[in-house]
Image: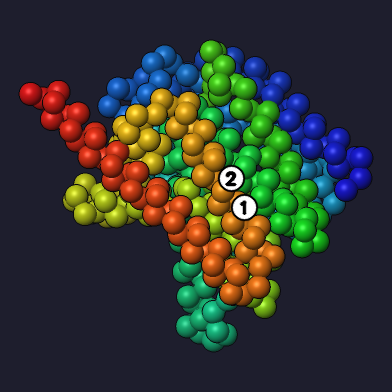
Amino acid sequence: MTAVFYFTIILAFIISFFSGFFYKQIAFKLGIIDEPDNKRKIHTRPTPLLGGISIYTALIVCVVINYPRFTELMPIILGATVMLFVNLLDDMRGLSARLRFAIEVIVAILMINSGLKVSFLPHGFWGNLGEIIITLIWIVGLTNAFNYLDGMDGLAAGSAVINLAFFAGILLMTNQVSLGFFALILGAACLGFLPHNFSKEKMFLGDSGSTLLGFIMACLSLIGTWAEHNLVRISIPILIMGVPIFDMIFTTFIRIKDKKIKNVMEWLKYAGKDHFHHALVYVGLIPRHAVIFIWAITFALGLSAIMVSNDADWEGVVTLLQASIIFLTIGVLIVVGRHRKTGWEKQEKE
């Protein structure tokens, strides 16, 4: 990459960081604030929700200024813009889960219509239909999974930096330079937001920011080429995004088992302290250490993705078995944390 590319990446960090101060003031003036709620949230003071806008601003400015294949990304940029502003309205006024889900599905269908689709099933009607369904579930599911991950300071944005670093690394290693450059720009913008998320006068991503990141990374994983002539490598995006994916699937399974949710709308609306990051707190970690632990797990899964991208078929299978142990560990910690929480609630009642 040229010096101009490096400058653009640095510029993304600078814009995201400095625009954050402006958006904090705007959030307080417009009342785009997350109020404390002991039942669902762990923060104790009103917090502005425009972190996603600062990341979006940096991304758009830098892509417009110096992205060599801007038109290639237009469908993703337009879809991300819709996701951002719909969820910004949700942050401001609260939208129904049904409306948000409908918009997510529509945007995902438009992405599929633009050519963004998995392509590993046999050709034919059923194969094409299966790929459309899988793509739809992937985009909508990962968009919401990353939203669920945004439960502690630095968790979602920091995880996104790690995810995007591994996406960029593999894309650059496979000569997909422009996509790798795009991932680095978005990663730098997330990095610029992180100081605001950790400061005393903090700012949150908001649903607008977390869904923006989840949506873009879901689309990035679809537009990139990972598995040419090697089906094992289909797992590369799954490994990179492994924590939010597994957390969403495992937590959903538990909620269905406990009859806390019965349909998609209840799944979207349900908010509880039963995710992986909550479980780590219940087993004894403070929130900051829980975030660092999840970053470490995310980094380990990213290393597995790099190994799969370079392994022979049989070596890739061994690497996937290794990653499965990590997912098993996450599942055990969620279950243990859930039992700890139940025990604490019983003690409080007694």
- Compared with residue 3, is residue 231 higher up or lower down, i.e. above or below? below
User: Does residue 273 appear to the left or right of 12 in the view shown?
Assistant: left
Q: Which of 114 and 237 lies nearest the eye of the viewer?
A: 237
Query: Given the image, on which type of amino acid does mark 2 rest?
Result: Phe
Query: Can you see residue 105?
Result: no
Q: Name the residue beneath numbered marker 1.
A: 303
The reply to whether dot 2 and dot 1 touch (C-beta < 8 Å) is yes
The type of colouring in the image is rainbow
Task: Quadrant for the C terminus, please.
Answer: top left
Disc 2 secondary structure class: helix
Residue at 32%, 52% in the rendered image: 252
Residue at 54%, 18% in the rendered image: 202
Residue 299, numbered circle: 2
User: Does residue 66 appear to the left or right of 134 in the view shown?
Assistant: right
x and y, in percent, of residue 20 in the image: 64, 22
3D distance between C-alphas at marks 2 and 1: 6 Å
The residue furthest right is 3
User: Does residue 148 appear to the left or right of 258 in the view shown?
Assistant: right
Q: Residue 316 sits in which quadrant?
A: bottom right
Query: Given the image, on which type of amino acid does mark 1 rest?
Result: Leu
x and y, in percent, of residue 5 in the image: 86, 42
User: Does residue 284 appear to the left or right of 295 in the view shown?
Assistant: left
Within-10-Å neighbours for mark 2: few <14, some 14–19, many 20+? some
- Compared with residue 213, is residue 222 higher up or lower down, i.e. above or below? below
Q: Residue 188 sits in which quadrant?
A: top right
Within-10-Å neighbours for mark 1: few <14, some 14–19, many 20+? some
Disc 1 secondary structure class: helix
